[in-house]
Amino acid sequence: MRRALLCLAVASVLLGCPQEIRPLIDGGVGADSGEPSDSGFSDTGALDTGALDADTPDADPPDAGPGDTGAADAGPQPDGGFTPNQPCEPVVLGCLDPALESVLSVPDEVSWTDALAMVGFNQTIQIRGLDVGAGVRVPAAVTLHGCEGARIIGAVAFEGIGGTIEGFEVLGSIVANQTGVYLVRRNRFVGGSSTEPGVSARSVDALVSASVAVVVEQNLFEDRTIGVWVATRYDTMQHQVTAQVHDNVFNGCETGISVSENGLVGHIEAEITHNTFYAFNDAIRLEALELPTPLTANLFVNGGRAVAGTSAFQLQVALLDDVVTPSQSGLYSGTFATGAAAFVDAAAGDFRLTAASDAVDLVGNAPSGLDYLGCPRPVGLFGSVALGDVGALEAQP
């Protein structure tokens, strides 16, 4: 067990690790291997969205736990004395204190069945070192927090109203298809046998209305067929999805983000901001969208098409490095810039920017926030003005 957990701490996939029999939390249905439009969860009715506090119960960065500092090697020192920073927050989330009244910890404190019966709004169910299988639904307005190597190995869905999923290694998928407001953060979506999207935010049921709002932030998507899928279908009822996808890394995904608006009443509003795409066929695919999609400060490196599909989009700073085709449709405003990404070590999955990167200080009026590593942006590495960087990682002084 110790060796397997060590492998989880130092790699995003279990390459070279021994097979292990792991406890399983299962929703009582078989694994779903269907098309991306149906992960085994149908829209069962529109719910009152209510108010959702998306914060985790502990406002401070959680303890990374013994033997897991969450810090990465600072990497080589490029030029000018600048050394890429270590993560400002642990890359792998630690466990929350089970003594907190807002935290129900499985299996050390309660069973999964008891946690479902006891949990209330704005509380957290913590999964320590277990596998979460197909058919599991996250209760309304609850955070599902993974730690100590917890994995999602099937299709897991939100029950409705709102909720958060964080801290998991995801070989399966996370589905948001009920009316509500959802947050998917700080997970590692790795390749596996599933062809399902890592995150599926959709309203595609013919007989049920749904208005879905989702934020996907600070996640790693690696070797997935599709990283994030946003979709509507059908000509009756209400089918609306709002998606904010920002500060994520897509490494080796065939398609990083796919947005598809189908049906007469389907409506999607998507914002795709500060993401890093590396080694892709199509980084972003936009199909049948009524409104142009804003694409802001995204970094595209070593891939086929930066933006595929037939829909219009609005570029606000984009950098290409070794990309075959910038856009399939040509229906866009703004300009693709070209330059050197100059990552610390892309082959090893280290996408921090060196001082030689043309992505540094390229974004004016960058909104304040946290990058993929939990570091503040904008910084302004080379001047007094706080300019932002293109991509998911902000170079720090």
Image: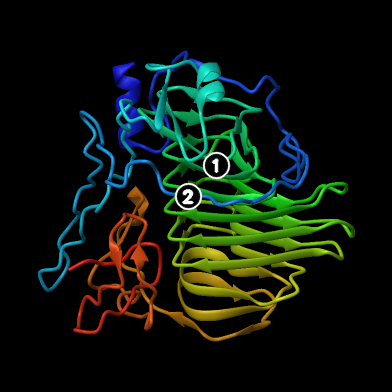
Badge 1 is on which residue? Answer: 141
| Image quarter hosting the N terminus | top left
Q: Secondary structure at mark 2?
A: loop
Query: Which x, y percent locates residue 70?
Result: 25, 41
Residue 328 seen from this side: yes
Instruction: Give the image quarter of residue 130.
Output: top left
Query: Which x, y percent locates residue 19?
Result: 44, 17
Identify which residue is drawn at 35% across, 70% down.
Answer: 368
Instruction: Give the image quarter of residue 297.
Output: bottom left
Q: Amino acid at mark 1?
A: Ala
Query: Which x, y percent locates residue 95?
Result: 32, 32
Q: Which mark is residue 53?
A: 2
Q: Is residue 147 left or right of residue 154?
A: left
- CA neighbours of label 2 inside 10 A, class few (<14), some (14 to 19), many (20+): some
User: Against 147, is 308 above or below?
Assistant: below
Q: Secondary structure at mark 1?
A: loop
Identify which residue is drawn at 52% across, 63% down.
Answer: 303
Query: Which x, y percent locates residue 354?
Result: 25, 67
- CA neighbours of label 1 inside 10 A, class few (<14), some (14 to 19), many (20+): many
Mark 2 vs mark 1, CA separation in Å: 8 Å
User: Against 57, is 332 above or below?
Assistant: below
Look at the image and name its color scheme.
rainbow
